[in-house]
Amino acid sequence: MKKQVDMEATNTIISEIEKNHRCVVEKDIRSEETHEKTEKSAGEVTAVADGGIATGTSDPSTMNLPYHSMSFVNDNEVKMASGQKITIVVGDLAKQTVDVIVNTTNDKVDLNANPCGKALLKVAGQELLNECQKIGSLKPGDMASTGPAKLNCKRVYHVRSSSWDNGKGAPVDVIVNTTNDKVDLNANPCGKALLKVAGQELLNECQKIGSLKPGDMASTGPAKLNCKRVYHVRSSSWDDGKGAP
């Protein structure tokens, strides 16, 4: 039976998804009033011609989804109140049958510059490469649209993400660390990465927390991290992919 997920349960689900699939889910926790404004503008879509560029800063086709209105379906899928489903699929991106494939790229839209582009080029062939070479330069946040060539989709969106800043990172209010019952920073890659930057001060605070039960959260200071607080969340134990009943 499907049920509406409250904030605490949703946080645990999302933490588990991030842990199991080694990804980061960006949560949108704005007010209901703000979400209503977003949903009203969701029907507006920016049309982009072949090789055209859409800037990303104020594009009305970009929409943050209110994650507190999601219903849990299974370990790989959640359902929005609007009826759409968000599903995590593990597989070869270039072999998916979809409407749109999104390729993260650099300023030159060079398909040979990263693993994602290379995988698409291998299947799509020279036609896609030729289209990308006609696009020109993209600024961070820009998107260009091309045809699919030999890919099994209708369009390919080439999006330039922000430049890598050598690990300095943008300042945030909170960093969430998924952890075990002992809040041991050395127990997983996420904790180790935080410890490497934060230093002994964060380790000392974690050692004072004690034990956490599944779903519990403890808060510490940032030490040398570029944030205000660090939330240490203990997710549920891994059940070999069986999922919750």
Image: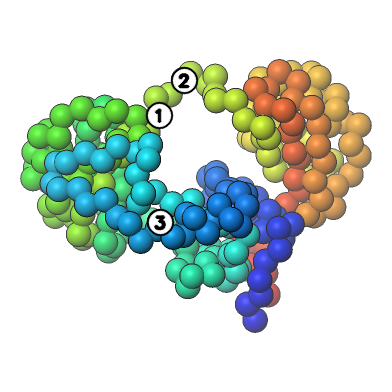
Q: Residue shown at 30%/55% (left/top)?
A: 45
Check disc 2 and report the residue beneath it. Answer: 165
Is there CB contact under 8 Å for labels 3 and 1?
Answer: no
Check disc 3 and report the residue beneath it. Answer: 41
Is disc 1 placed on a helix, strand or loop?
loop
Crowd around label 3: few <14 · some 14–19 · many ≥20 (10 Å)? some
Q: Check disc 3 and give the amino acid type.
A: Ser
Is there CB contact under 8 Å for labels 2 and 1?
Answer: yes
Who is closer to the viewer here, 146 or 65? 65
Crowd around label 1: few <14 · some 14–19 · many ≥20 (10 Å)? few
Q: Check disc 1 and give the amino acid type.
A: Ser
Query: Would residue 210 be visible to someone looking at this image?
Result: yes
Query: Would residue 186 be visible to someone looking at this image?
Result: no
* Relative height, residue 92 to residue 241 (above, below): above
Who is closer to the viewer here, 8 or 234? 8
Q: Residue shown at 71%/18% (left/top)?
A: 224
